[in-house]
Image (cartoon, rainbow, N blue to C red):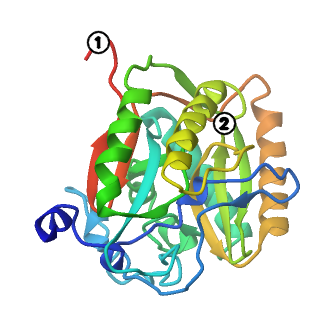
């Protein structure tokens, strides 16, 4: 049993549960809320800034302040538990990164409390280096299909097997990220700037969530919100800044719409599978006919 536990990289005692599972959202239109946020606030160390040091880059971020409050555990530690999370990996297309970076730079001036998700560097400081900002936006983001929940080691094989059986064969489809939206977590301690899916890909993603809910229910795990709003989160701020951030987003979008009346979405990405993260171990859940 100890050898099996070791293969998953340790229990929840040494696992980071990212607040970006902020992507688990409720359907409240006036105040969208996220599902898998913190019950205990234990700051975790941020990822090394060397992750943003790319070849040929002339600027360094080693001296930038890092937000310690962003990375917190989403549930109390119990020895032998492993964090489980299902999601669709997403990469912002190269052509869209410059536009997204420009939008973030404008918002960072209006809401200086924003930090980039996962990297946890103040956005207004990161925005001073266009190259670093665009490189940061080239990282993987995700659309949550489940809450992040603790499971026991004996549940792992059953959950992964069942997910693969139910989600084994999938077709590729396009996902349109067409709306900037503001979300807050359940206890109003975090506000997130996100890109929501309201058209292309929404039906397919909701079907995935329904299947994951079925598997979670069979294992006595909390299901995702019934009226979840799929999205990826790019930036966060402490506290409930939803009014300020929403107004800032609205104002900037209004200006953009005047310039680009015909544009329907921020960017479009192809669905390339579903990933399951348990502890530090990754599982590819679905396959495609051409694989």
Q: Which mark is residue 197?
A: 2
**Residue that mark 1 sits on:** 290
Local packing at callout 2 (Cα closer than 10 Å; few below 14, some 14-19, many 20+) is many
Q: Is residue 28 above or below residue 189?
A: above
Residue 261 image offset from top left, x and y in percent:
80, 27
Q: Is residue 53 above or below residue 207?
A: below
Residue 212 image offset from top left, x and y in percent:
52, 40
Q: Nearer the viewer, residue 47 or 290?
A: 290
Q: Is residue 123 above or below residue 92?
A: below
Left or right: 25 in relation to 144: right
Local packing at callout 1 (Cα closer than 10 Å; few below 14, some 14-19, many 20+) is few
Left or right: 49 in relation to 142: left
Instruction: Tell me if I can see residue 195 in this picture.
Output: yes
Question: In the rendered image, which quarter is residue 287 located in?
Answer: top left
Classify the position of the C terminus by image quarter.
top left
Which-is-in-front pick, marks 1 and 2?
Answer: 1
Indicate the secondary structure of the residue bearing disc 2: loop
Residue 102 image offset from top left, x and y in percent:
59, 51
Indicate the secondary structure of the residue bearing disc 1: loop
At x 72%, y 44%, the residue is 226
Q: Which numbered disc, 1 or 2, marks the residue that appears first in the sequence?
A: 2
Left or right: 129 in relation to 11: right
Instruction: Tell me if I can see residue 144 in this picture.
Output: no
Q: Which mark is residue 178?
A: none
CA gap between label 1 and label 2 equals: 26 Å
Residue 81 image offset from top left, x and y in percent:
36, 71
């Amino acid at each position: 049993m100890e050898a099996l536990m070791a293969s998953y990289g340790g229990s929840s005692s040494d696992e980071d549960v990212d607040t970006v599972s902020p992507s688990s959202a409720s359907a409240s239109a006036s105040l969208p809320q996220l599902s898998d946020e913190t019950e205990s606030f234990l700051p975790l160390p941020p990822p090394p800034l060397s992750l943003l040091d790319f070849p040929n880059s002339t600027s360094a971020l080693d001296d930038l302040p890092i937000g310690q409050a962003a990375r917190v555990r989403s549930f109390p530690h119990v020895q032998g538990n492993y964090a489980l999370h299902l999601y669709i990996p997403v990469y912002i297309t190269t052509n869209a990164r410059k536009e997204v970076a420009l939008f973030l730079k404008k918002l960072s001036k209006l809401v200086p409390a924003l930090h980039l998700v996962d990297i946890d560097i103040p956005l207004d400081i990161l925005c001073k280096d266009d190259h670093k900002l665009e490189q940061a936006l080239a990282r993987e983001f995700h659309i949550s299909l489940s809450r992040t929940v603790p499971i026991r080691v004996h549940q792992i094989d059953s959950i992964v097997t069942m997910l693969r059986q139910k989600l084994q064969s999938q077709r590729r489809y396009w996902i349109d990220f067409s709306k900037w939206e503001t979300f807050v977590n359940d206890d109003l301690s975090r506000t997130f700037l996100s890109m929501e899916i309201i058209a292309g890909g929404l039906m397919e993603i909701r079907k995935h969530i329904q299947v994951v809910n079925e598997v979670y229910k069979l294992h006595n795990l909390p299901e995702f919100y019934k009226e979840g709003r799929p999205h990826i989160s790019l930036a966060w701020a402490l506290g409930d800044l939803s009014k300020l951030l929403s107004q800032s987003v609205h104002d900037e979008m209004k200006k953009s719409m005047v310039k680009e009346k015909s544009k329907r979405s921020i960017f479009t990405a192809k669905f390339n599978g579903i990933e399951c993260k348990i502890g530090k171990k990754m599982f590819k859940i679905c396959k495609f006919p051409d694989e």
